[in-house]
Amino acid sequence: MVGLGIDGAISLRQLKRILRRKCLTRRINYSDPAEVVAAVERELQGSGSLLGYRLMHQRLRTDYGLVVDREMVRNILKTLDPDGVERRSKHKLKRRKYKSKGPNYIWHIDGYDKLKPFGFCIHGAIDGYSRRILWLEVGSSNNNPRIVGKYFLDCVVQVGGTPGICRGDAGTENVNIAAMQRFFRRDAPDAFGGDKSFLYGKSVSNQRIEGWWSFLRKKRNCKELRSIGTSIKIRPSRKEDSPAGRPDVLYFLPEADGKESYLNEVAIEEVDVAMDVCCEEPGNDISESFSELARILMNENALRMPTNPHEAENIYCQLLCLIDDIQ
């Protein structure tokens, strides 16, 4: 109870109701609206044109250090990008039922091939419980099992162990990950030890990572997605098996929600064996002679490195014209 004077007392809920009716809130030093509008306009020129107001709000806070509420961001986007708001409002993700006992109980791995025609081969993994992004890599191939295996082993070293279960597609790119996972868990006493520690299945059934690819395709570029994706707050859900909170907190502090981590420690000697047998560093397929020619042409024509997609497209077209002139 909250005391008022000597004789009266009201509940905390009643106090909040009174404050809301009187439009009384905590004083917050919000950023200048003009700065917010300018930042949104700048983002709309690049990958920010695909963001909804929630992710735009997150980007303004993390990248620009602006103090702004979501309602203002929503109104600004509705004014500056009405067509984009209307397009996004028509696409709603159909939720599926999913259950994971805790962090590191199951990792979902998959490759993303939509950008392969342009030379960008993406591979990633996500923790099934916390939805924390474990790795997100772009290379010249996401089908080479030794390169994909290196992504997995680097993550095992970073977090200090391997998950109880690893879930992937029935493709040749996952054979080395499956071999390492089963090697690390060969003597595990639980029901998912040995061969059962890696699960093959259809891509459409690999729900966590497939849903996240949809999020990637619609919302953000790869470099920024991992850092923001691990800190963005997951909203509460009516489903008991979908915990709310920040992925990093859910992953590293499962005890706060009455859960436990299912991480299995791996000996450094086993890591060394897996590295020698199953892994290799991603290569670089870019021609050194072409890179050197491009640098020379940019220096001779005073071209600067691009800062957004539109500038990159313009410089690319200019370089093509300059190379044609040489030939």
Image (cartoon, helix red, strand yellow):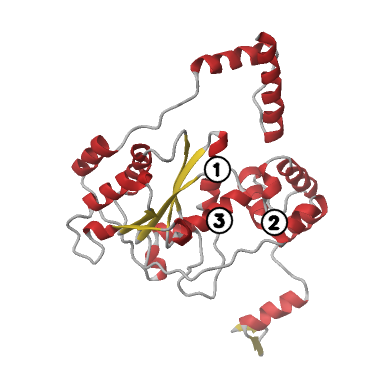
The residue located at (71%, 33%) in the rendering is 310
Q: Could you say which quadrant of the image residue 261 lies in?
A: bottom left
* Viewer-proximal residue among 74 and 35: 74
Q: Could you say which quadrant of the image residue 104 lies in?
A: bottom left
Seen in the picture, residue 88 relative to 321 is either above or below; the reply is below
Residue most toward the right?
Answer: 79
* Viewer-proximal residue among 249 and 5: 249
Disc assigned to residue 53: 2
Disc assigned to residue 97: none
Task: Say which amino acid is labelled 1.
Answer: Cys
Task: Say which amino acid is labelled 2.
Answer: Tyr
Report if the CB atoms under discs 2 and 1 are less than 8 Å apart. Answer: no
Q: Which residue is mark 3?
A: 232
Report if the CB atoms under discs 1 and 3 are less than 8 Å apart. Answer: no
Which tag is nearer the camera, tag 2 or tag 1? 1
* Viewer-proximal residue among 234 and 194: 194
Residue 156 shows in this picture: no
Dot 3: what SS?
loop
Q: Which residue is mark 1?
A: 222
The quadrant the C terminus occupies is: top right
Q: Position of residue 302 (x, y in %)?
A: 70, 15
Judge from the rendering whether residue 301 lies leftward or rightward of residue 295; answer left or right.
right
Which tag is nearer the camera, tag 1 or tag 3? 1
**Cα distance, mark 2 to mark 3?**
13 Å
The residue located at (66%, 31%) in the rendering is 307
Seen in the picture, residue 307 relative to 69 is either above or below; the reply is above
